[in-house]
Image (cartoon, rainbow, N blue to C red):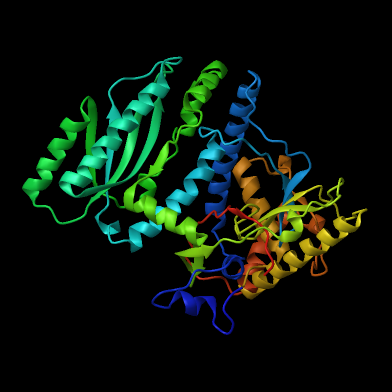
């Protein structure tokens, strides 16, 4: 629960802000606006990743490699607009684009926070180590990766011991060539623990090249943006070069390998977060984004109990922080198994009541934060979806659950032609949020807990 009588913004302005709760994030981020154009581009990127992930998964499964988890009758429901989509769950195969995106996010947010607040953060430097030999398809990629990781680990240990330089992150990345060979390299973050003279720094760089041996070393200077160093293992579009048997080989060569490795002080920072039950998230703060610590919540004890519930109507699997899943205004999303508005069981009715409690809670914050009515938000999103496809008349809209007392206009009455009118009405009648809101896509599901 949030601290009583103190607003979240007053707490964020404090010299040492306390970790936030899920309730705080819900209150601050619900209704957070992304420009429609930004949302359209981000949505297009996500759809491309989702399509590519499904293609790769089907290719793997055609060769007997299980890539998807059972997710029949699972939907994601937008708490404010009532839109919902069926969801596809995948195994943690690291080169699947959606899995790579999911695993990148917590490391990237932690690095952003570390970059701003840790003593070594402002001294972080970025380097790239390129392994000398390209690996052909069906070659020994695993051995190449492991040999490179061991060499970097030995160098990192000696750099800290002998030069007082901390190596804080190692991320393995691959480029795929047109001949279907792979070229592995590593993105490195490191920082001197004390000021080094130009001569001493030049000696360190020369020693590094000799110590790593047989690789191409490039120091890229001070780290400006953490996104530059925390990347996907593969450029998603390059995976299209690989055939299905190539993908099966890649699966076996990278299985259970850790490709992104925080080290030393950065690893200790992440361990501290886990020990305290915290993670780093983006918060809407006075029209801008601010990185904050969030207290993780534990799953509701009621859902843990083994109950004789074979039907499992409206079983709530998780509830996410507000995200831009359904349009340019952020809303929390509930993942539900066997969703129905007309449950036949007692547990199904109880869970539907809980879902409606969550939805009313989100709608309250949505209205307080100055977001438009859900009908307008849906219309704007549909207009952008139509612009994305370029075929307005052929775009299939999201399914919408509209059994909410506050709905003033039937969703079915809104057409593509109405979008400009609704957008104009919104600009005239409703005070818009502050300009230049940044884009976030906070999609981390959290287990349920009582507030």
Q: Estimate the x, y position of residue 184 in percent, counting from the top left.
A: 36, 27
Q: Is residue 342 left or right of residue 96?
A: right
Quadrant in the picture for residue 79: bottom right
Q: Estimate the x, y position of residue 43 in percent, counting from the top left.
A: 58, 46
Q: Is residue 256 left or right of residue 404?
A: left
Q: Is residue 177 visible?
A: no
Compared with 438, 12 (above or below) is below
Compared with 299, 24 (above or below) is below
Image point 79% across, 66% down: which residue? 407
Q: Quadrant of the N terminus?
A: bottom right
Image point 48% across, 64% down: which residue? 293
Quadrant in the picture for residue 154: top left
Q: Nearer the viewer, residue 239 or 159?
A: 159
Image point 77% across, 61% down: which residue? 355
Q: Is residue 304 visible?
A: yes
Q: Quadrant of the C terminus?
A: bottom right
Q: Is residue 15 left or right of residue 78?
A: left
| Mark count | 0
Q: Estimate the x, y position of residue 40 in percent, counting from the top left.
A: 57, 49
Q: Estimate the x, y position of residue 166 in percent, counting from the top left.
A: 25, 48
Q: Is residue 191 left or right of residue 64?
A: left
Q: Nearer the viewer, residue 46 or 20?
A: 20
Q: Nearer the viewer, residue 197 or 326?
A: 197
Compared with 433, 141 (above or below) is above
Image point 18% across, 32% down: which residue? 211
Most distant residue in the bottom direction: 5
Q: Nearer the viewer, residue 129 or 177?
A: 129
Most distant residue in the right direction: 344
Compared with 2, 296 (above or below) is above
């Amino acid at each position: 629960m949030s601290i009583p009588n103190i607003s979240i913004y007053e707490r964020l302005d404090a010299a040492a802000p306390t970790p936030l709760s899920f309730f705080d994030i819900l209150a601050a981020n619900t209704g957070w606006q992304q420009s429609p154009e930004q949302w359209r581009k981000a949505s297009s990127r996500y759809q491309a990743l989702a399509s590519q992930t499904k293609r790769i998964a089907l290719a793997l499964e055609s060769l007997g490699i299980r890539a998807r988890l059972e997710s029949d009758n699972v939907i994601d429901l937008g708490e404010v607009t009532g839109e919902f989509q069926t969801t596809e769950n995948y195994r943690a195969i690291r080169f699947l684009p959606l899995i790579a995106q999911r695993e990148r996010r917590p490391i990237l947010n932690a690095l952003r926070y570390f970059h701003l607040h840790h003593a070594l953060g402002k001294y972080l430097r970025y380097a790239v180590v390129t392994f000398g030999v390209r690996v052909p398809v069906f070659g020994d990629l695993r051995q190449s990766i492991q040999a490179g990781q061991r060499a970097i680990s030995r160098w990192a240990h000696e750099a800290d011991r002998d030069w007082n330089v901390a190596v804080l992150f190692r991320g393995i990345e691959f480029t795929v060539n047109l001949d279907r060979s792979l070229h592995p390299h590593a993105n490195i973050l490191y920082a001197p623990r004390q000021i080094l003279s130009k001569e001493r720094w030049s000696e360190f760089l020369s020693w590094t090249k000799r110590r790593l041996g047989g690789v191409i070393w490039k120091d890229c200077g001070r780290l400006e943006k953490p996104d530059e160093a925390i990347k996907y293992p593969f450029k998603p579009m390059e995976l299209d070069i690989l055939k299905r048997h190539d993908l099966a080989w890649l699966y076996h060569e990278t299985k259970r390998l850790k490709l992104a490795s925080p080290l030393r002080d950065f690893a200790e920072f992440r361990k501290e977060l886990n020990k305290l039950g915290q993670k780093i998230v983006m918060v809407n703060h006075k029209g801008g984004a601010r990185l904050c610590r969030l207290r993780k919540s534990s799953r509701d004890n009621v859902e843990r109990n083994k109950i004789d519930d074979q039907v499992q109507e409206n079983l709530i699997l998780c509830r996410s922080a507000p995200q831009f899943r359904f349009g340019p205004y952020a809303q929390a999303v509930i993942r539900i198994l066997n969703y129905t508005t007309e449950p036949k069981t007692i547990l199904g009715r109880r869970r539907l009541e809980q879902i409606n409690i969550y939805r009313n809670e989100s709608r309250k914050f949505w209205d307080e934060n100055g977001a438009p009515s859900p009908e307008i938000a849906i219309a704007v999103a549909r207009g952008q979806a139509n612009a994305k496809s370029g075929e307005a008349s052929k775009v299939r809209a999201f399914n919408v659950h509209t059994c909410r007392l506050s709905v003033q206009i039937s969703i079915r009455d809104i057409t593509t032609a109405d979008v400009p009118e609704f957008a104009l009405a919104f600009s005239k009648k409703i005070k818009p949020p502050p300009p230049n809101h940044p884009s976030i896509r906070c999609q981390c599901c959290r287990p349920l807990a009582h507030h």
